[in-house]
Image: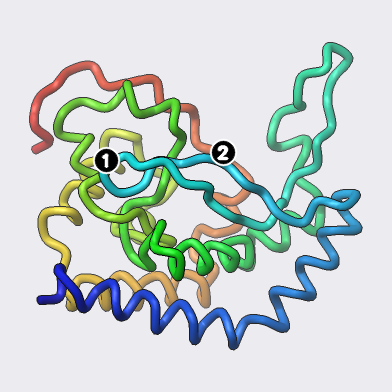
């Protein structure tokens, strides 16, 4: 029952309530980023969702569009603004994704939506992460986030797909809130980007 109906019902109810409560913060951050990023408050990017269906994820734009002499974007670490760093460290950049949850693109809890370019690189086991809607937070996020390897992250994602339930989701939400309140690893992880995923070495089942 939870997987077929109740999870989606809770997603809509909780995302709507949280978004309404967060509206004042949403507008303040949007206005500040609008001026900080020269008219660009939001970041839109295509990501694969459930069953690899492509959707546009919405986040606050925390990096400017500065480029080098060749017209290429500078590294992430050189483009993140002071305001953007604060927004990331406070986890405020995730607020717009509540709109994705309400629309049905995402869930509050689930594997994080990654780049479309990664789709051909997953092995058959890792592809299972797309059997459910991607989430704002997930099992991998509360178990290491950027400090673990891609392979371990995908292993945790697949574990979630195979075991998720109301109690598992509540546990993940509880751990997420604790991490945000304690700022556990947030500062470091926000400023150290994950290396790009280049594919796994084999097509064997995760242990």
**Does residue 69 appear to the left or right of 100 in the view shown?**
right
Q: Which residue is mark 2?
A: 193
SS at mark 2 in the image: loop
Instruction: Residue 2: give x, y in percent of width and height.
Output: 15, 75
Q: Quadrant of residue 174?
A: bottom left
**Camera-nearest label, 2 or 1:** 1
Q: Is residue 97 above or below residue 69?
A: below
**Does residue 84 appear to the left or right of 173 in the view shown?**
right
Distance from disc 2 to disc 1, alpha carbons, whole Å, reads 17 Å
Instruction: Residue 22: give x, y in percent of width and height.
Output: 62, 82
Query: In the drawing, what numbered circle is on residue 154?
Result: 1
Q: Earlier in the sequence, mark 2 or mark 1?
A: 1
Q: Is residue 189 above or below residue 79?
A: below
Q: Residue at x 27, y 40 (%)?
A: 154
Q: Residue at x 32, y 22 (%)?
A: 121
| Residue lying farthest to the top in this orientation | 70
SS at mark 1 in the image: helix
Query: How many circles with numbers are drawn on the protein?
Result: 2
Report the coloring of the rendering. rainbow
Contact, CB < 8 Å: mark 2 with mark 1?
no
State the residue in front, 106 or 65. 106
Q: Residues within 10 Å of mark 2 (few under 14, many from 20)?
A: few
State the residue in front, 187 or 119. 119
Instruction: Residue 169: give x, y in percent of width and height.
Output: 25, 72
Which quadrant does the N terminus fall into? bottom left
**Does residue 177 appear to the left or right of 42 in the view shown?**
left
């Amino acid at each position: 029952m939870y997987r077929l109906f109740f999870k989606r019902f809770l997603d809509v109810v909780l995302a709507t309530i949280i978004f309404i409560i967060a509206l004042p913060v949403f507008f303040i951050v949007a206005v500040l980023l609008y001026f900080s990023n020269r008219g660009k408050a939001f970041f839109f990017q295509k990501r694969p969702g459930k069953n690899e269906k492509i959707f546009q994820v919405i986040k606050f734009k925390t990096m400017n569009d500065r480029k080098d002499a060749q017209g290429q974007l500078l590294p992430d670490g050189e483009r993140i603004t002071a305001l953007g760093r604060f927004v990331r460290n406070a986890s405020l950049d995730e607020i717009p994704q509540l709109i994705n949850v309400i629309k049905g693109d995402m869930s509050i809890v689930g594997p994080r939506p990654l780049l479309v370019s990664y789709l051909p690189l997953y092995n058959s086991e890792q592809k299972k992460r797309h059997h459910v809607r991607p989430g704002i937070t997930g099992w991998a996020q509360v178990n290491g986030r950027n400090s673990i390897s891609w392979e371990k992250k995908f292993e945790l994602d697949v574990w979630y797909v195979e075991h998720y339930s109301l109690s598992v989701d509540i546990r993940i939400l509880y751990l997420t809130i604790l991490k945000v309140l304690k700022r556990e690893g947030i500062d470091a992880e926000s400023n150290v980007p994950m290396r790009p995923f280049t594919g796994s070495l084999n097509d064997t089942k995760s242990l």
